[in-house]
Image (cartoon, rainbow, N blue to C red):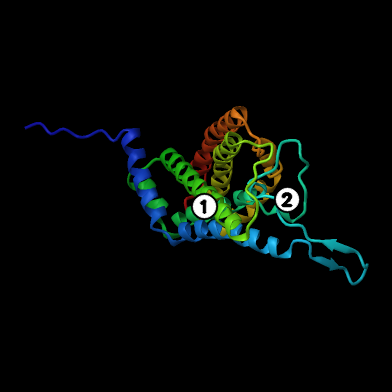
Amino acid sequence: MERKFERNDFGKRLKSMLKVDFRRMFTMPLLYIVVGVCLVIPILILVMTTMMDGTVSVNPQTGVETVIEGFDNVWQTIGSVSGAAMSMDLTGMCNINMLYFFIAVLVGLFVAEDFRSGYSKNLFTVRAKKTDYVISKTLVGFVGGALMLLAFFIGAMLGGAIAGVSFELGEVGVAQIAACMLSKLCLVAVFVPIYLAVSVAAKQKAWLSIVGSLCVGMLLFTMIPMLTPLDSGIMNVVLCLAGGAMFSVGLGAVSDLILRKTSLV
């Protein structure tokens, strides 16, 4: 009787790798911690800034007075309109864009655990190829980052309702805000491959992968409000989607090369 062996092709390997990675991610406390933090942050920001709005602080050395200004509306926690200068005040920095740094922590710790536990070495020895690993980690990291952004958006809506902050849209329409959020979600695909490349280079050294990812992320931080303004349109979505695709392919190849040329321990 002739025996037939199933061919372990790319599709089956990737499906198996994704199944394992998603199961691991959704059973890790880390994911729920970072998503929970992303949900709570905008609530605290809106409540605290509303309470302190108009408060005057005086520098005892110079005597200079500083007036603390709160958010004019909830949508400022999501972004600013195109053409507006990136301000360094509280309302300009405490918005959804800072979550791109949080994604570096999620990716760095997730990948470091693979190398620390010996899971990656066993994985590559037994069944998976390094390309499968990179693709799977990129997709899983994207989903994790998207969940963080969505949690922040929900938290901002809750925080606005609790703090009594205005939901007035002004000159910005609902469709533009939807395009803004979609652009930010697509932009996750730009940052995740960067963090993944740094993480596979750092291997089990989680601190090194996080520090390296944050340093690279800071170099690209100023492009976020320019590519994903509050008054975004379909062109912003297309640009972020194209950028995500190019970074995923290009830096995915870099991550694959790093895994091939370096030790797995």
Which residue lies at the image location 61% right of the left edge and 35% below the top edge? Answer: 176
Which residue lies at the image location 34% right of the left edge and 34% below the top edge? Answer: 11
Position of residue 125 in the picture relative to residue 238 (left or right): left
Label 2 close to label 1 by CB (< 8 Å): no
Give the vertical position of 115 relative to 258 (above or below): below
Position of residue 19 in the picture relative to residue 195 (left or right): left
Cα separation, mark 2 vs mark 1, equals 20 Å
Q: Is residue 205 visible?
A: no
Count of numbered tags: 2
Position of residue 136 in the picture relative to residue 226 (left or right): left
Q: Nearer the viewer, residue 258 or 188?
A: 188
Q: Nearer the viewer, residue 51 or 187?
A: 51
Crowding at mark 2 (Cα within 10 Å: few <14, some 14-19, many 20+): some
Q: Residue furthest bottom?
A: 60
Q: Is residue 149 visible?
A: yes
Give the vertical position of 171 relative to 92 (above or below): above
Q: Quadrant of the rendered structure where residue 128 is?
A: top left
Which residue lies at the image location 50% right of the left edge and 56% below the top edge? Answer: 35
Crowding at mark 1 (Cα within 10 Å: few <14, some 14-19, many 20+): many
SS type, badge 1: helix
- Residue 66: image location, x then y, percent: 85, 62
- Residue 248: image location, x then y, percent: 53, 36
> Which residue is disc 2 drawn over?
92
Q: Quadrant of the rendered structure where residue 189 is?
A: top right
Q: Earlier in the sequence, mark 2 or mark 1?
A: 2
> Which residue is disc 1 drawn over?
151
- Residue 166: image location, x then y, percent: 65, 51
Q: Amino acid at mark 2?
A: Gly
Which residue lies at the image location 74% right of the left edge and 61% below the top edge? Answer: 53
Q: Which mark is residue 75?
A: none
